[in-house]
Amino acid sequence: MSLLQTRREFLVTGLKGAGLLAASAFVPAFLTRTAAAAGADKDAPLLVVLQLSGGNDGLNTVVPFTDDLYFKARPTIGLRGESLFKISDRIALNAALAPLRREFDSGRMAIIQNTGYPNPNRSHFRSMEIWQTGISDRIEPSGWLGRYFDAQCCGTDPKEENQKSGNAEIGISFGKVMPQSFRNRSNLGLSIDNPETFLWNASGETESLAKAQQAIFEKLNRPGTGGLSAPATSKNMSMAMLGGMDPGEPATADFLRHTAMNAMVAGDRIRNALKKGQSRVEYPASKLGGELAMISKLIAADFPTRVYYASQGGFDTHANQLENHARLLGDVAASLAAFMKDLRLRKMSERVLILAFSEFGRRVAENASGGTDHGSAAPMFLFGDRVKGGLHGVPPDLENLASGDVRHQIDFRQVYAAVLEKWLRTDSGAILQGSYVPLDVVA
Amino acid sequence: MAFSPLPAEAFDAAKAAHLLWRAGFGGTWSEAEALAARGLEPAVEWLLAPARESDSAASGQPAAPPECALLEPDHEEFHQKLRALPEQEKRELARKRRHDERKKVDELKRWWLEKMLTTDRPLEEKLTLFWHSHFASSFADKIQYAYPMWQQNECFRRFAFGRFPDQLRQLIRDPAMLVWLDNAQSKRQKPNENFARELMELFTIGIGNYTEADVKESARALTGFSIRRESWEFVFRAQAHDVGQKTFLGNTGDWSGDDIVEILCEQPAASRFMARKYLEFFLWPNPEPELVEAAAKLYREADLELAPFLRTLFLSREFYSPRAIGALIKSPVVLALGALKSMRLALPQGPIILNALSLMGQDLFFPPDVNGWPGGINWINSNVLLVRYNFSNLLINGVNPETFRVRVPREPGVRMTRRQIIEAQRSLQWSPREQLIQLGLDRKLNDPKAVVDFYLRDFLHRSVEPEFHRQLVAFLETDAAGGRKSFSFDDPTFDERVRGLVHLIMSSPDYQLC
C-alpha cells in the first residue's frame, strides 16, 4: 500500500462521522512527502525491538554451567540439571527458554555474550538511557532509533527546518509511554496502548453541529497554527519534544497538535488492520504476547513501519529470583516463539529481525534474599532468518570481575551498528554518532 | 537570579486560578475570584495552613485507615496458616487473598481521589501526590496489600510540608518502601543494595554524587531496617544490622540509617536535587541552572523545610510570569479532577475513572517504577492524548464508556461488566442548563458570547485568540443546514451545544496545559 493510497483511503473513510480533513485543505506533514517516506516498500526490512526492563540476569539466562565459580557465587540460585538445556560444551540456556530451542537449533537465534559499554552505570534509569540513546559519555535526549527515523525522512542535518515531515508511522511502540529510543526531531513515531482509543468522536446528535465541531477540532489540533491561546512556531516544536527547550513556549502546544494529528490519521488504519487478519498461531495471554500478535497483524497489513517496539518489565530480581525469573523468561520465550512461527506461516519471516536487550545484567554473587543486585555486562539476542545463529563472543570470565560484575567484551553499539548497516542498510556512524565496527551477526 | 515578590495588588482572578491549578487541582472561575478577593498572602497562607486540631497532621496521631485499607481480621493467623499448608493449597489461598486486596486497593484509589477532589487543603493533597511519585512504591508484585499503601499515603500526607531529614527518617521506616525496595530482608551477611541505591539516586542527591562504594556502605548501614509481616509494622532487627565501621560520602563511623539520612541532607547536592524537582513540579520544566541554584539556596535557608520554600515561590513574580502560565502538562490526575471541578461534578461512580487514569498513564498506587511518573512531555504520546480527549467526551456526553474498559490481563484496572457500561452511559449526561439555573446564571448567559466566555473561564482560565473565540460563538449559532441562527438559553438544543463547546475546549492541546 503506498502512502498515496493511504491518504486517499483516509480522505474517504475519514474519522468516524464527518471525515476529518475531507473538508479542509490541510494535510498532515507526513502525508505530503510520500517520496521520502521509507516504509512504503513492501519488502523493506523490519526491526522489532524487545526491551527487557529491570536488568535481566544474564548469568541465569545464558549459563556457564561448567564454571565452578558460577556455583560458588550462587549456592542457592545457581542453575543445574533440569533447570538447563545445553547448547555448547560450556554454555546452557535456562530451561524456561525451551520454547526457543527450535529457533536456536535452526540457526535463527544469535546470542551475543557479555555486551555492555565502558564505565557501566548501575542505575536502571541512566543505564536504560544509555542503551536507548546509544550515547554513554554525555546526556543525549534523542534516541538511536529516533535518529534513524530522522535520517530516513529528513537527512541528518537537524537545522534544515523545511525537511520536517515524513512517515509518522515509521516507528510504532506499544505501551503507555514512548521509549526514549524513539525520540526524534521530526515528530515521527506512534505509541499505541489500546487501538480502540485511537479516534476522536464529535459529540452531539445534530449532524450540522457535529460537522461544525469537527471542523473546529481540526483547527485546534492542526500543527503550526495558533490554537486556542497562543500562536505557535513550528520550528520550536521538535526541540520541545527533545526536552531541550522551554515547553512553556507555544512549542509544547504544537507538539501536542502534531501528536494528535499523527494519532488520528493512523488510528483508523491501525484499528482496521487489527480487526482483520486473524493469526493461525496462539499467543500466550500475556501483555507481551498480545503486543507481538498485534505487530504481526500490522506487518501483514503492509504498514509503512520500519521499527516496532515492545517491552516486558519485572526483571529487577533483587529477591526470590528463581521462580520470578523463570516465569518472565518463559513468557518471553513462548511469546517470541509464537511470533516467529506466525511470521513464517504468513511468509513474512524473511523481513523481520528481532533484537532483545536489557539495561544491564546482574551481580555475579547472589544476595541474602535469594536474588541478585544490579550488575553490568549481559547477553543480547537477535532472532530472524538472516541472523548468524549460535553463540557470539566468549563465556563470561568469572575470575576477572570488575567490582563483582562481569566485564563487557562487546560494545552493544557494535550490535546496533550491525543492525543499521547490514539490516536497515543505512550508515551507522551518523546515527550512533561514533564509529563502531559492526559485529558479524547478520548474514 | 532570585525570586522577587509579586506586588499584592497584581494578584487577580487569573493569577488565583493559576495558583489553584499548581497548588491544587484547579477549580471554577468563581473559586478563583473568591481566592483573589482574599488577597495574595492570605491565599498562600490558606494553602500552607497547618492542619486543624482534629487532623492527623496536627495531632501527630496516625489517622484511622478507611475500611478498604484494613488488614483482614485473620491476617496474623493467615500467615501462619499459609506456612503449614501444602504448596498447591498455599498458592490457591495466596492468589485469592491477592485478588481481594486488589479490589481493596481500587477502593483506596477512590478514597484518595475523593479526598483530592473535595479537600479544603488542596496543597496538602497535591504534595501527597508529589511524594507518591518522588518516593514511589507500587502495590504490584511485592506489596500486594492495601493497608501498607494507605499507611505510606498517610505518611506522605503527614510530612507533606515538613523538613527533608524528618521525611527521610520516616521513609526509611516505611513498611511499604522497605518491602518494595527489598530492604526488609537485607541482612548484614549480604546486604541488599536496592534501597540504598535508589535512596541516593532518586530520592536525595541524584546520580553522579556518590560512588558504588557509597551504595555498598549505605546498604550495610540500612541492614536491619525491616518489617513485621504479620502486622506491616516497622521493626529494627538488631541481629541483622551491620554495626561495623562504614565510610559513606567521605565520613567514617559506625553509621546506621539515621546517620545516612543526616549525611545525605548535609550534601549541597541534596538541596539542589530537591529544588529542581520542586521547580519542575510547581513552576516550569527544565529550570535553568541559576534558578535551581537560587531555589536550592532558598531551601537550605529554610533548613530544608518545604513550607517556607513554597511560600516564597507562591508569592513570587516568577511564579505568575507569562513564562510559567500554562507551562506544565497536566498530569492525568490533575486533568481528571480539574475537569470534574470545572464541570461542578462529583466523582463518577463505577470503575470508569480508575480505568481512565490507568489508560492515561497514572494509576494511583501503581507508579510504573521506583522513579515514579516521569511527567512533563512524557505524559503525552499519540496514544494517551486521544485517550485524554475521549475521556472528556465520556465525562461530558457519556460517550464510549467501553473504550475505558480494561481488557489486558495482568494490567491494573477494573473489569467492567456490560451493565456497568450502560449505567455509566446513562449517569454521565451532564446538563449545563440545569446547572446554570441552579447557579442563578440562566438569565445572564443569554448571549452566545457570554456563554463562550463563561465556559472558557471555567475550563481554561486563560485568554484565547479572538479568532477562536469567534469560531466557538459561531459553533453555538450553527443551524441545521450548517448556516447561522440566533442562540439563546431557551434553545431546545442548549445542552447539546454547550456540551459540544466544552468538549471542544477540552479536546484542545491548550487544555492539556496548566
Image: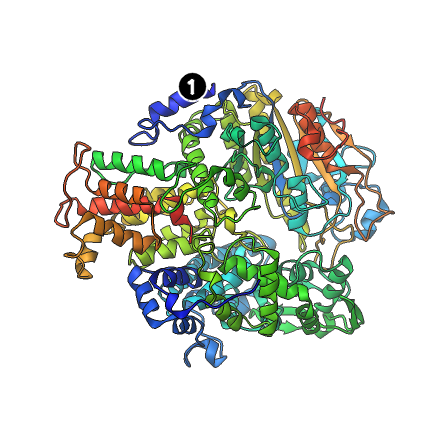
Return the residue nearer the eye: B24 or B425.
B24
Query: Which corner quadrant of the image does residue B218 belong to?
Result: bottom right
Residue A59 showing in the rendered view: yes
Residue B9 on image: x %, y %: 37, 68
* A408 vs A34, nearest the viewer: A34
Q: Which kind of residue does numbered mark 1 sit on?
A: Gln
Subunit under mark 1: A
Q: Quadrant of the C terminus of chain A?
A: top right
The answer to which quarter of the image holds residue B50 is: bottom left
Residue at 30 percent across and 45 percent down: it is B466
Q: Quadrant of residue A194?
A: top left
Q: Position of residue B266 (x, y in %)?
A: 68, 70
- Give the residue pinned by disc 1: A5
Q: Is residue A283 visible?
A: no
Residue A434 is situated, as x and y percent measured from the top left of the image, at: 73, 35
Q: Residue at x 33, y 26 (%)?
A: A22
Q: How is the image coloured?
A: rainbow
Q: Nearer the viewer, residue A308 or B448?
A: B448
Horizontal side of A416 relative to B228 (left or right) equals: right
